[in-house]
């Protein structure tokens, strides 16, 4: 007798109905895609689902700082081509790596419930127990994120900041090497947690120290516009509160034309009461050396009985309004400085 899996595999009809999830081949991308697979399996136990790992340009260029490459869709282009050519049915991304404007024919089909979006510090073994504040003068902080280094240079001018590339395991190895130049490295809590590195987290940075990246900690699923079958399939995976928050954050970034290599920081909260919801968005732009920093906060409230698309429009407008406020204060000058890099 055939098992149900074998029946599914041997039936062409089932194969055609199966869903192929595309993603990068990195350990984190694979882990996140397995999370999506598990959620889909929970909703549709008999659905045949497979994962297709695809190498992107970003995975191949490991020796150049991201901010110097300048291509916004570094980690997404090859995946979108596979989606376009129907080699995959949807693509699982870290939403913060997905440009705020998608190519024609692509949509954000779902945003999953967000993990803690804050940034974290991993100290080298010899600095265990210390914090950014208590590290000795001149200690080297490893990060390739200009957002992190620009903001932290203001708070901790006694430290020095240096690029570090490679996947998480490579970075931890560089940090722990006996002749390591790094005292600590900075990473998103979400990635460390998903890969099981919680025990190495020395410090989690609140918004008064460091504003996180747009969409940090959220997983986004890209699909083909007009693929109603996939859109319907994804509906139960959408976490509306996360979607509202990242909609405001992405709108803020889109209007400032910030790619992944721009020192933009955000922080959102969504406060729900019985009748109304209030969305708060803080946003910042920082010059690379930390000498100039603009930060503002706006909020919007709505009645919970409003339709979802109305709420999302208000979140979108909040992001736009905050970006206009920062532009009024001189954000464009700071951002133009980066274009010369
Ligand atoms: C983007 C940045 C980084 C990634 C820039 C930033 C970090 C780059 C670096 C846009 N994408 O955050 O200011 O440190 O060299 C990335 C990570 C995750 C998604 C890793 C990380 C995991 C967390 C998540 C790389 N993309 O930031 O530690 O799901 O948000």
Image (cartoon, rainbow, N blue to C red):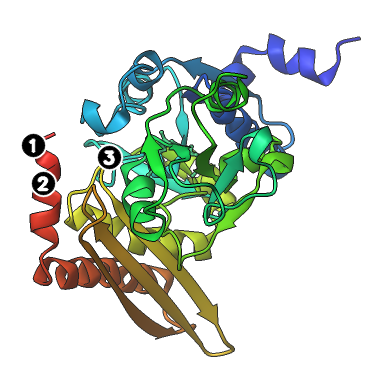
Alpha-carbon neighbours of circle 1 within 10 Å: few (<14), some, or many (≥20)?
few
Residue 78: mark: none
* Left or right side of 117 for 319: left
Measured as percent of width and height from the top left, residue 11 is found at: 67, 13
Alpha carbon of mark 3 to alpha carbon of mark 2: how far? 13 Å
Q: Position of residue 273 (x, y in %)?
A: 57, 87
Of circles 1 and 3, which is in front? 1
* Secondary structure of residue under mark 3: loop
What residue did someone put label 3 on?
261
User: Which of the 4 image quadrants contains residue 313?
Assistant: bottom left
Q: Position of residue 24 (x, y in %)?
A: 47, 23
Residue located 8% across and 37% down the image: 340
Residue in the image at 53% along x and 17% along y: 52
Establish whether ligand 1 lies closer than 8 Å to the Cβ of label 3.
Answer: yes
In the foreground, 246 or 173? 173
Residue on which disc 1 sits: 340
Q: Is residue 316 left or right of residue 321?
A: right
Q: x and y percent of residue 123 in the render?
A: 61, 40
- Residue linked to disc 2: 337
């Amino acid at each position: 007798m055939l098992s149900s899996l074998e029946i599914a595999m041997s039936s062409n009809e089932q194969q055609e109905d199966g869903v192929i999830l595309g993603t990068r081949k990195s350990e984190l991308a694979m882990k996140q895609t397995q999370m999506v697979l598990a959620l889909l399996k929970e909703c549709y136990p008999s659905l045949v689902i497979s994962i297709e790992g695809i190498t992107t340009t970003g995975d191949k260029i490991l020796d150049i700082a991201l901010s110097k490459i300048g291509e916004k869709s570094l980690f997404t282009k090859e995946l979108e081509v596979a989606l376009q050519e129907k080699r995959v049915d949807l693509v699982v991304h870290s939403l913060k790596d997905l440009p705020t404007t998608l190519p024609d024919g692509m949509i954000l089909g779902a945003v999953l419930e967000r993990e803690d979006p804050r940034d974290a510090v991993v100290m080298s073994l010899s600095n265990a127990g210390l914090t950014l504040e208590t590290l000795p003068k001149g200690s080297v902080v490893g990060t390739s994120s200009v957002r992190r280094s620009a903001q932290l240079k203001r708070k901790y001018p006694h430290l020095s900041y240096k690029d570090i590339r490679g996947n998480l395991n490579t970075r931890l190895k560089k940090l722990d090497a006996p002749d390591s130049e790094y005292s600590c490295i900075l990473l998103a809590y979400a990635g460390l947690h998903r890969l099981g590195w919680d025990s190495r987290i020395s410090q989690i940075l609140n918004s008064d120290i460091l504003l996180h990246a747009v969409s940090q900690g959220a997983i986004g699923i890209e699909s083909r516009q007009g693929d109603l079958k996939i859109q319907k399939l994804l509906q139960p995976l959408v976490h509306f509160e996360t979607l509202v928050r990242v909609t405001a954050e992405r709108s803020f970034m889109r209007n400032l034309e910030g790619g992944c290599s721009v020192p933009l920081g955000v922080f959102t909260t969504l406060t729900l009461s019985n009748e109304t919801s209030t969305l708060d968005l803080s946003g910042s732009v920082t010059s690379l050396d930390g000498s100039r920093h603009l930060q503002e906060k706006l909020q919007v409230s709505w009645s919970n009985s409003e339709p979802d698309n109305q709420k999302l429009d208000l979140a979108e407008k909040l992001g736009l309004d905050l970006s206009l406020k920062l532009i009024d204060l001189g954000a464009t000058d700071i951002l133009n400085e980066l274009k010369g890099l």
